[in-house]
Image (cartoon, rainbow, N blue to C red):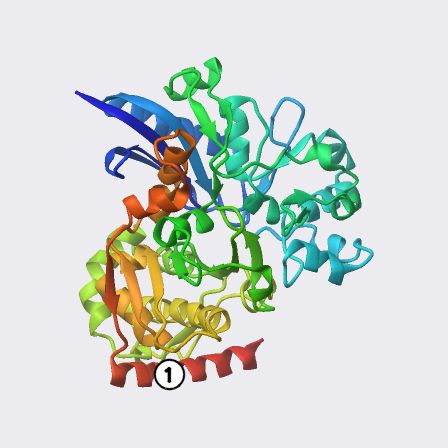
Amino acid sequence: MTSGAVVCAVDIGTSAVRAALVTRGGRRLVEARSGRGPDEGAETFDAELLWEGLCDVLRRLSAEGPRADVRCLAIAGHVGQVPVDERGRPLGRAGGWADSRGVHELAHGWPDPADALRVTGRPAVTGGAVPLLCRLREEEPVLHERTRWVLAPKDFLVLRLTGAAATDPTSAAYTLGSDVTRRAWDPALLAVTGKGTRHFPPQHAATDIVGAVTPPAAEATGLPAGLPVAAGGPDGTVGAAAVAGGAVGAVVDVAGTTDVLTRVIASPDERPAAAVLNPYLTPDLWTCGGATGMTGGALAHWVRLLGLGDPATALRRLEPTLRALPPGSDGLSLSPLLTGSRFPGWNPNERGRLWGLGEHHTPAHVLHAAQEAASYVVRQAVDTLMADLAHDSAVVLTGGPSRSPALAQLRADVLGRPVLAATEADATLHGAALLALVAAGLEPDLPTAQAHTAPRLHRYTPRDAIAASYERLYREWLGAMGCMS
């Protein structure tokens, strides 16, 4: 069977690598998934294993998919940093989105930290390529000397596919070395690393073609040699673009291992002080918000910790029991922030906690408390991000919870705002396909591509009595978190 022109979309998530062949209309012809180990992704990971996972899913697409005219490939990936040598080989374990190595060194290395944070659009010093290089400079000078590039995870994979080092302005913003308003590397920010701009890849628009699949990469992946590859972008921003397009003011929650809250804004001046400022995937627009810290990842951790097996299977099996539990989980509460809080609290030392445990509580109570706590964490971010918006302004939800009417309704009840759950739960993979469609010339620009394939949204409104209960429980949870910090 021949299927005409398609693109290849890739989503590099903390828990899995996924890929799909997608038509211009957004229909997926075939998909493949490869899971990542529990120690691969959030804090550190093996970049070679990530490359092997990508090769695995792409080979399966080639073997299982229909014959098609593949026009372009684009990758959306989680935030992180992969130092590589002159030959593109990883140097040590790469850093994921929760990697805080080098934060202390950077905070004491910048001559004017407040000005540096203003230029980088950050409310606090977090992990990234610049702090990691600061750490290597002090503690592992041999690796520091050997470092040729420091790349985002998806940029490392683009390098492996094409031989070209490239990034996009949104990924560059997460390094703490880029001037986010100019969308360009800042030599003064990079000076503290002992490396210059030549060690950071050129910045391109997410939909720019930055290289083509080399013959060795074609042999490893099953992709056609010469296939154009786009710059791509970070998973949270790409997922938000899939449901928001270029709609200024739209607020999107991309829920996964962590929840990434994104608001599209027309000017950097609209950013709340606690939010991250990023260049958007379309010119002249910006986003503010950030990743919250572990939410869905903590729920999956509790499933494994309780010996319930595969998280997805266990949650499906227990869903009727979870739905029957009352607000507050019969007095059980927890914090899901296993690797520290990010937006809006920015406390890297925060850790998960469980309180109120009694002998009447079951594993289902723990999981329900984890679902509620994830919603409380998102509520903190939403209240910060939407403080100037009307109380009936909706949050667009995509990711795992949008698949579940019960979880989408829980979000609405806890947030006290309408939630528009996207029927397309795999927003990041869909967003990567949109980038590839534009890069291939099959769509003129990202907003147009999004409008042609916009997912349907199902509206959930807060239930008055239950929302009132959650308002009280949320305030109690905030108080308990403050007492324990």
Q: Position of residue 317 (x, y in %)?
A: 20, 58
Q: Which one is nearer the viewer's eye here, 237 or 53?
A: 237
Q: Which one is nearer the viewer's eye here, 339 or 454?
A: 454
Q: Residues within 10 Å of mark 1 (few under 14, many from 20)?
A: some
Say if 123 sits above or below 390 in the image: above
Q: Amino acid at mark 1?
A: Glu
In the image, is 197 to the left or to the right of 5? right
* SS at badge 1: helix
Q: Quadrant of the C terminus?
A: bottom right
The residue sitting at 69% across, 46% down in the picture is: 130
Q: Is residue 80 visible?
A: no
Q: Position of residue 51 (x, y in %)?
A: 47, 30
Say if 314 sits above or below 190 in the image: below
Q: Which residue is mark 1?
A: 471
Q: Which one is nearer the viewer's eye here, 397 or 80?
A: 397
Q: Position of residue 214 (x, y in %)?
A: 48, 17
The residue sitting at 31% across, 71% down in the picture is: 418
